[in-house]
């Protein structure tokens, strides 16, 4: 009888320890995503300023070369590294780091919602050809950047001198795994809290509109990354038991974030969101939360993998790309056209 009681107590202790480990594991993933999400927003802002009208004058809000095109290209290029070719090597060192770099950093540098919103503003201004060309150009350059990233990463792996040593090191189990995970957890928790606190502090110290919007975006960025990561659990489940190949989670994240950005943009154009404070919050939500909730790099990687598995004429990757763009285009046309019809005219970009 005493042995049974001891076994039950040991089983309860094991279950409790397992729950604690699962909780710490989830906290570690969220910390990685939050940290890399904020860094992704900062990098996207820097690229927007560098290639935008103020410095290089390559991109513009009214051009098919939309303002976030360089960020989407850069994120897709490095997604070829960390999300396709080197994903197993990074996951062998740390699965959470692999998720943080691919889903967190590359997913937050790129943004599907801002791209869609820019093209819809052009289309609703009457420039259909330019807007549709922007959709086509954005998708092609994203895929090309991903393929170049994959090829360059494979070239790097091919240049390794000692493949045998690499294979041997892969077969060995890392030592002190518990302490390494604990250290990594604490590091990214402190980094995430530090970056979020810095953004929150600078929000009240900064006076310029653009910088204030950036810091609001940084404080809201983790919410967008977490929502996208949560929705990614829907990938592989299909729709009503059908289309199991369809990455439903990524599709929902991109279309939902784009639709939310359309609504906020319409409210700004109609003057509902007009005062300085509301415009700041709306801009921060669009650039931070919705920008991180949607992603082009993950979309491009999923198209790549679907095409790799394609057999014969069934090109699921291309179907997924067309579905993502058409669903977003339809949502935008319905939203903007309804308001334009009510007001008896075309909504022009502000």
Image (tube, rainbow, N blue to C red):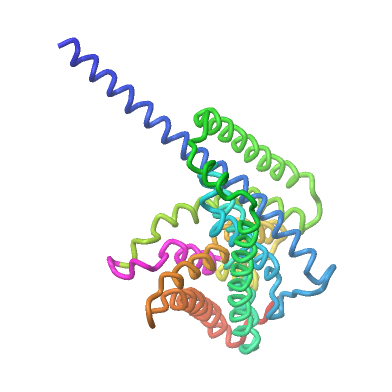
- In the rendering, at what x and y percent does residue 261 appear? 57, 67
Query: Looking at the image, can residue 34 be seen?
Result: yes
Above or below 294: residue 319: below
Residue pictured at 71% horizontal, 50% vertical: 215
Q: Residue furthest right?
A: 55
Res. 109 image quadrant: bottom right
For the residue pair 93 and 243, the one nearer the viewer reads as: 93
Q: Is residue 346 left or right of residue 11?
A: right
Residue 209 percent location from the top left of the image = 77, 58
Q: Nearer the viewer, residue 200 or 63?
A: 63
Quadrant that contains the N terminus: top left
Q: Quadrant of residue 344?
A: bottom right
User: Magenta region: which residues?
Assistant: 240-260
Q: Is residue 44 above or below residue 196?
A: below
Left or right of residue 340: residue 243: left
Depth order, front residue of 197/99: 99
Q: Position of residue 47 (x, y in %)?
A: 74, 62
| Picture layout, residue 106 above or below residue 95 | below
- Is residue 252 on the magenta stretch? yes
Q: Is residue 191 magenta?
A: no
Query: As rendered, which of 133 and 197 lies closer to the eye?
Result: 133
Q: Give the farthest residue toward the left.
A: 1
Percent coordinates x, y for residue 292 in the rendering: 58, 57
Count of numbered marks: 0
**Looking at the image, can residue 94 be seen?**
no
In-image side of 336 versus 213 (left or right): left
Residue occupying the point 33% across, 25% down: 14
Quadrant position of the C terminus in the picture: bottom right
Magenta span dominant secondary structure:
helix
Q: Residue at x 59, y 36 (%)?
A: 189
Q: Quadrant of residue 145?
A: bottom right
């Amino acid at each position: 009888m005493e042995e049974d009681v001891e076994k039950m107590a040991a089983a309860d202790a094991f279950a409790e320890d397992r729950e604690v480990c699962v909780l710490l594991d989830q906290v570690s993933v969220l910390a990685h995503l939050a940290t890399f999400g904020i860094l992704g927003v900062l990098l996207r802002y820097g690229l927007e300023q560098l290639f935008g009208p103020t410095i290089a004058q390559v991109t513009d809000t009214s051009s098919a070369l939309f303002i976030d095109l360089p960020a989407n290209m850069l994120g897709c290029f490095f997604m070829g590294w960390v999300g396709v070719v080197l994903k197993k090597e990074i996951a062998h060192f740390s699965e959470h780091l692999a998720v943080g770099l691919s889903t967190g950093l590359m997913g937050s540098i790129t943004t599907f919602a801002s791209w869609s919103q820019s093209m819809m503003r052009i289309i609703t201004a009457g420039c259909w050809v330019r807007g549709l060309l922007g959709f086509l150009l954005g998708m092609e350059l994203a895929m090309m950047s991903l393929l170049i990233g994959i090829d360059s990463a494979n070239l790097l792996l091919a240049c390794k001198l000692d493949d045998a040593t690499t294979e041997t090191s892969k077969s060995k189990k890392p030592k002190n795994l518990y302490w390494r995970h604990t250290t990594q957890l604490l590091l990214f928790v402190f980094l995430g809290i530090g970056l979020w606190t810095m953004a929150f502090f600078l929000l009240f110290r900064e006076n310029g509109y653009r910088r204030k919007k950036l810091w609001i975006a940084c404080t809201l960025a983790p919410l967008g990354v977490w929502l996208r990561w949560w929705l990614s659990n829907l990938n592989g489940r299909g729709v009503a038991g059908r289309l199991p190949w369809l990455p439903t989670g990524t599709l929902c994240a991109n279309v939902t974030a784009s639709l939310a950005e359309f609504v906020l943009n319409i409210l700004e154009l109609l003057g509902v969101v007009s005062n300085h404070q509301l415009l700041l919050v709306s801009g921060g939500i669009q650039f931070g939360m919705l920008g991180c909730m949607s992603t082009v790099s993950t979309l491009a990687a999923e198209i790549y993998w679907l095409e790799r598995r394609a057999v014969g004429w069934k090109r699921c990757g291309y179907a997924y790309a067309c579905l993502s763009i058409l669903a977003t285009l339809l949502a935008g046309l319905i939203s903007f056209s309804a308001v334009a019809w009510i007001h008896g005219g075309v909504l022009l970009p502000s």
